[in-house]
Amino acid sequence: MLGVAALGHEGRPRAVLIAGPTASGKSALAMAVAERIDGVIVNADSMQVYRELRILTARPTTADEARVPHRLYGHVGVRDAYTVARWLGDVAAVLDDLDRAGRPAVFVGGTGLYFTALTTGLSEVPAVPAEVRASVRAMAATLGAAGLHARLAEADPVMAERLGPADGQRVARALEVLAATGRSLSEFQGERSAPLVPLDRAAAFVVAPDRAWLRARIETRFRMMVGEGGLDEARAFAAIGVDPSMPAAKAIGVPEMTAAATGAMAVEDAIAAAVTATRQYAKRQETWFRNQFGGWTRFAPYAGAVDEMVAAATR
């Protein structure tokens, strides 16, 4: 159960949702908005939940956290396979707290699936046994992306129609669910829980900066993270021995910097590879936001952005 907050009652202060690609400046906007409306920032980034990866996931600094209250940052260990369902459960508890305090939530992050689940609900898919996941992973390694998609097309044509061969993780997920439950993932997707924050109770924004500016900003920020201790953080992460299949091990920049920290890659080569991976990720984020968040207000960061967001949140 997601708690009373799932009802989205009219007494709750209007929430602010700020989505955007990595390095787009959305966290600074969120802090400025939260200060103006006495809000509390709630993390909507699937990698910033990990305690041991403050620098490489660009989590808010301790100074940021002292300036404005932040929730659901760094509260999970890297050995933990944190899921969107668990995040929604954590969000429900946070919203209950904020309801009692009469303070609005300012959600900020780049994980489109989190925002979608927050505003439209989540399909209640049963847990998939570890042996089923292992079997599908082995199948993927043997068949490759095209072969795995062909297998899905044979077994579940509805999901195969929705997913392309390049969507490897989701193709594997659809096969896992089918193998574990005997039902198509599409059936579960049609059975959604009530949204915690319906869009009619939120001011929803997508930060959409100029692409050339964002590309340059990504490199500048990544080099800054390395200078602030990113390599040491990667070295400590490598020492933990996290299974490469765990979500934290796949965080953008972590595989590359871990390779550099362990001597498997030159530092400058690792930085270049991480910057490229980050730019590719930002492009995928933009595609999700454009396709999934059509009703959200899009804007490039500008001087009056905070005023516009505050006005929308307090109408």
Image (spheres, helix red, strand yellow):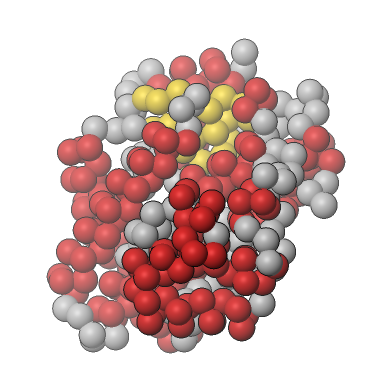
Examine the rendered structure and indicate whether residue 51 appears above or below residue 25.
below
Where residue 98 sits in the image (x, y, percent)?
74, 38
- Relative to 307, 36 lies left or right: right
Q: Position of residue 63 (x, y in %)?
A: 48, 50
Q: Nearer the viewer, residue 245 or 182?
A: 182
Q: Nearer the viewer, residue 132 or 262?
A: 132
Residue, x 34% and y 73% (percent of image)?
A: 144
Asked if residue 286 lies left or right of residue 36, the reply is left
**Residue nearest the observer in this picture, 246 or 125:** 125
Give x and y (percent) for residue 295: 50, 24
Q: Nearer the viewer, residue 303 or 198?
A: 198
Horizontal placement of 220 versus 162: left or right? left
Farthest residue, direction top: 315
| Quadrant holding the C terminus | top right
Q: Residue furthest front?
A: 154
Using the rendered view, name the quadrant where residue 232 is placed.
bottom left
Is residue 52 visible in this depiction of the protein? no
Residue 117 picture quarter:
top right
Q: Residue at x 21, y 45 (%)?
A: 215
Q: Is residue 243 above or below residue 9?
A: below
